[in-house]
Amino acid sequence: MRGSRQPNRRRVRQRTQELRGAIDGMDYLASGTLHTRTKVCGRKNCRCADDPDARHGPYHEWTRRQHGRLVHSVITTEQAQLIARAIANYREVKTLLVLWECETAAEILSRPPAPKGG
Ligand SMILES: [Zn+2]
């Protein structure tokens, strides 16, 4: 039967159900890196000059590639929390895609070759 020589999509679907479920549960997805820092303003009389705990900030900066160019955005603390989650999701999706790719390759390569001729 011709159908039996097709890759078993249903089996791959079953094996990757968990992976797809994990991706389905995600909302935000972002690449790049997030940096949080505090700053010294440089004014002589400001407490930040002597006290590390009095430094200004925190300031959050999100850096990522967009159309091949590096883009920096200064973002709020609330945005930084969302971006941090989105970056974690992105890394998780990349890991899941590698697993999915492995399942696909294992399934397709395990198929016996079709008989020649016919
Ligand atoms: Zn200062």
Image: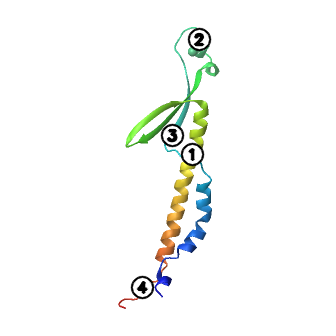
Residue at which label 2 appears: 46
Question: Where does the image place residue 97, in percent across and percent down from the top left?
Answer: 52, 59
Q: Amino acid at mark 1?
A: Tyr
Q: Can you tell which quarter of the image residue 49 is in?
A: top right
Secondary structure type for disc 4:
loop
Q: Amino acid at mark 3?
A: Thr
Q: Is residue 102 above or below residue 3?
A: above
Residue at which label 4 appears: 114
Secondary structure type for disc 1:
loop
Q: Is mark 2 within 8 Å of ligand 1?
A: yes
Closer to the eye: label 3 or 2: 3
Instruction: Look at 49% across and 76% down and name the residue there.
Output: 7
Sequence-wise first label, 1 or 2 = 1
Quick one: 63 or 30, which is closer to the camera?
30
Q: Tell me, for residue 28, which label it has, or none.
A: 1
Label 3 close to label 4 by CB (< 8 Å) = no
How many numbered dots are placed on residues in this image? 4
Q: Tell me, for residue 33, which label it has, or none.
A: 3
Closer to the eye: label 4 or 2: 4
Label 1 close to label 2 by CB (< 8 Å) = no
Instruction: Look at 40% across and 38% down and name the residue there.
Output: 70
